[in-house]
Amino acid sequence: MTLLARSISALCVLGGVAAAERTVTVAPAKVHPGDPVLVTVTGTSDAPRGKAGGAELQFFPAKAGFQAVLAVPLNVNEDHILVEFTAGPKPLSIPIVVKTFPETNVTVEEDYADPPKADRVTIDADNTAIGASYAKARGAPQFAHGFHRPPGAVTSTFGEWRTFNDGHRAQHLGLDFAAREGSPVAAIDDGIVALVRDTFLAGTVVVIAHGGGISSLYFHLSKASVAEGDKIVQGSKIGLAGHTGRTTGPHVHLSIHVPGGMVDPASFIKLPIYPTVKLAAHTSGHRLPNRVLSAQR
Ligand SMILES: [Zn+2]
C-alpha cells in the first residue's frame, strides 16, 4: 500500500510534447491490472481527445489543463497500456506490472454459488442495466473535490479470487467495508443517481454518475433511499447497509467504474483529480455527520 501510494503521488512525465508547451503526465507511473490511471494534459486550451486500451478518454477541464481517468483492465494480457491522442501529443506507453491477487473460498447458499437458469437470465439483465448506467457518467464532472473513502475496516480487497462452494470462481470487482446492518451509506462524492435496482448477486444496488466517465456503485444495501435522477452531494445518505444478494454478512461493497473497466477503489481514491467544472447540485438527503465520513479515511 505504501509503495502504491508513493507511486501515485510521484507524477511522472512520460513524454509526448507535440505543441509548444504541451505536456502529458500520468499517475501512477507504473500500474497493475485493475488500477486506475489519471492522464493530465497541460499547455492546451482545447480538450484533448484520445483512447487507451480501446476505451475513449473522457477529458474534463482541471486545475491545470485537462484530466481523464482510465482503467487498466483486470484481464489485460499485454505488458503495457497505450494512451493515444487523436491530435497533438505522441502516444504514451505505460508499463503494466503483473499482480497476483489473493485467493479465498466462500460458502454461500447453493443458488448463489451455482445459480439456476432462470436466475442466470436475471443476472444477465442486471449486468446489462448496470453496464448501461455507465453512459450517464459521461460529460462534465459533477464533483469539485476528492472522493471520500467509506468508513469501516476493509474486509475484502479488489481483485481477490473467490471460489464459491468449491466450484464457480469469480474475481471481486470492488472493495468491501465492514458495516452494521441498517447503518447509513454515504455517497463518496457529488453526482447524479444513475441506477437503483434490486439485483440477484449484488442485492440492492445504487450507481452514482460523477461525470468524467466515473461511476461509483454500492452493493448489498438493505434499502436504497434515493431515486434515479436525484442529484446528491458528497456524504449524503443513499441507503442503508445490508446483506442482500450473494453475501456472507452485512457490509458495504464499493465499486468504481471508469472508461476501460472496474478499478481498485483504494487506488482510485488516492488519484490527484482536480476538476474545475461543477454543476449545481441539490441534495436529496441529509449530509451525514462528519465523524462518520472521516472515520478511518
Ligand atoms: Zn464486495
Image (spheres, helix red, strand yellow):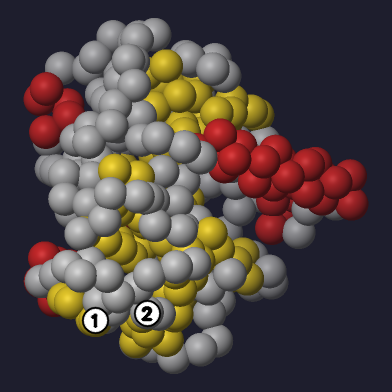
The quadrant of the image that shows the N terminus is bottom left
Residue 267 in view of the camera: no
- Rendering coords of residue 209 (x, y %): 47, 34
Q: Look at mark 2 in the image and give the residue it sits on.
A: 90
Q: Quadrant of residue 232?
A: top left
Q: Is residue 120 visible?
A: yes
List x then y, in percent, for residue 79.
44, 91
- As helix, strand or loop, the secondary structure at mark 1 comes to strand
Q: Residue at x 24, y 40 (%)?
A: 275
Q: Amino acid at mark 1?
A: Gly
In this view, the residue in front, 44 or 236, is 44
Q: Dividing the picture into quarters, in which one does residue 43 lie?
A: bottom left
Residue sitting at 69 percent across and 72 percent down? Answer: 167
Q: How many marks?
A: 2
Instruction: Tell whether label 1 touches label 2 (CB within 8 Å).
Output: yes
Is residue 60 positioned above or below 206 on the image? below
Q: Quadrant of residue 15?
A: bottom left
Q: Amino acid at mark 2?
A: Lys
Q: Which residue is mark 1?
A: 15
User: Badge 2: few (under 14), some or many (20 or more) residues near its Cα, within 10 Å?
Assistant: some
Figure quadrant of the C terminus: top left
Mark 1 crowd level (few <14, some 14–19, many ≥20, 10 Å Cα): some
Q: Position of residue 49 (x, y in %)?
A: 46, 58
Q: Residue 286, percent across and down?
A: 28, 9
Residue at the farthest front position? 20
| Location of residue 114 with respect to 34 vertically, above or below | above
User: Helix, strand, or loop for circle 2?
Assistant: loop
Residues at marks 2 and 1, CA–CA distance in whole angstroms? 8 Å
Pointer 2 or 1: first along the chain: 1
Q: Is residue 177 left or right of residue 208?
A: left
